[in-house]
Image (cartoon, helix red, strand yellow):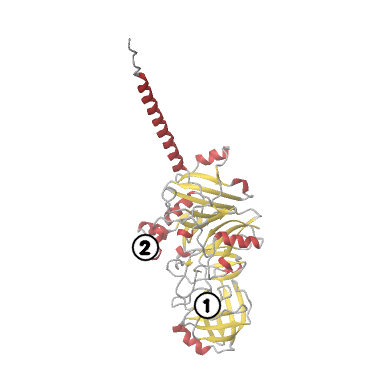
Amino acid sequence: MPEKKDHRNPLHKLIALCILILLFMTVLNVMRMLEDNESKPSTNRVDVKETPPTSNTVQAKETRPRSVKDRKSLDTRRWPDGFRLYKYSWVGNAAVYVAEMDRDVDNLGFDVGLANSQIIGRETVTGVTRRLREKRIQSLAGVNGSFGIRSDGYGRGGMLFNLHIQEGELVSVPKLLNRWGYSPPSPWGETSFGVTPDGEFLLEAVHLNGKLHIGEETLEIDAINQICASLCPVVLYTPRFGRSTLTRRCYEFTLKKLTLPLTGKYKSRFAVTSVNSRGNSIIPSDGIVLAIEPSLGYKWFRKIPRSATGQLEIALTPEKWQTVQAGIGGNLRLLRNGEIEPELIDFARTRGASAYGHRNGADRHPRSALGFSEDKLFLIVVDGRRPGHSLGMTLYDMASFFRDIGVKNAINFDGGSSSALWALGDIVNRPAHDYERPIFNVALIRKK
């Protein structure tokens, strides 16, 4: 009798294959969900560690602002007292990295670092912190700060546009201008941050109030270590600028026999040691150069002979800035006492049309900022230009989000590919080009 064929085996195999396919698709979907909820690891970031599930964590999750999708603690094992490092996920699809410092701790403080220790040139945030460490200055976090130019036809291979005060030295003071990178002369442009010796945080526009007296003549100084041009016709160049002034056709006067460095409250006699009508004068290590743009300079060229003597006076206003030891500038104010700046609201409503020179702020990009409240200082970076990880923020988005996480006052720093937050020994965010871009200066949280 012929043996019967078993028709069940192929059916069983088909069922098993379908089960395996369904299982594979389920695992694949779970993996995709995990990738959407967490950022991909990067070789130049510190490890991300979840906050332990304590009762405080549960309470924080219950009271989390609606704009915050998630918050993770970064490298908690290395936090000193008064310092914290977080990664936020914004509901609008952006990753935000925040370094926080308690204002009432005695072991931490705010500081600044200048790229290559001079105005001309650039350096990475990591490079600045490394140089400071060699001077036994231990930084905990640093974010790229001021705006500037990367290079131009005058040989300025990097030059910041904003205020910089380091160890009490008045390194750079601009003239307020309503142009990209500068602080406009309005409440929206109150964007220099500094700390007084008694710990008060200042956030406002700073004015130079510099005067040069020669005989009965008085010449007002517009800026220190900035570009001498028709909009900023009288500039002082100190040894912090670089080897020479890099001007063209400016009338320049070398001043010596004066006290250095320049400070927020300053007065010193000087003597003119050389006069130059062609520009680009060498800046002496023991003196400064007064540069005047051509249309105004010709008049003073005839009034200031070589060997003339006089007096230089500087008095920053508001007056509290005269004692600031560390200060840094941005270009636009985001928050004032917990409220979004009215000019920023109008800027967002018109999609940048209300301030065409700053229209980049109406689009989503990587961004950097500094903020503070009554009890904390915040250094902040928003990643952007990375689909699947973070698309960036507009200035209005950033101000609104900062307000949600407890920031009361904030200013905008240089962003885009420059946005980088260094903390606890490494870059913690994901820069737009996957590498650190050299920048002009750095806002720091450091150990005292």
Q: Is residue 25 positioned above or below 341 on the image?
A: above
Q: Amino acid at mark 2?
A: Ser
In terms of secondary structure, where does tag 2 sit?
A: helix
Q: Residue 90 in the image: x percent, y percent? A: 45, 47
Residue positioned 55% across, 79% down in the render: 211
Q: Is residue 175 positioned above or below 307 on the image?
A: above
Q: Which residue is mark 1?
A: 245
Q: Residue 297 in the image: x percent, y percent? A: 48, 84
* Viewer-closest of 263 and 141: 141
Q: Label 2 vs label 1: CA separation? A: 35 Å
Instruction: Report the number of discs.
Output: 2
Mark 2 crowdedness (10 Å alpha carbons): few <14, some 14-19, many ≥20 = some
Quadrant of the drawing holding the N terminus: top left
In terms of secondary structure, where does tag 1 sit?
A: loop
Label 2–label 1 contact, CB within 8 A? no
Q: Residue 435 in the image: x percent, y percent? A: 50, 57
Q: Residue 65 in the image: x percent, y percent? A: 47, 45
Q: Is residue 346 positioned above or below 162 on the image?
A: above
* Viewer-closest of 120 and 230: 120
Task: Locate residue 289: give its quadrant.
Answer: bottom right
* Viewer-closest of 284 and 215: 284
Quadrant of the drawing holding the C terminus: bottom right
- State the residue lying farthest toward the top: 1
Label ID, residue 354: 2
269 left or right of 342 in image: right
Label ID, residue 401: none
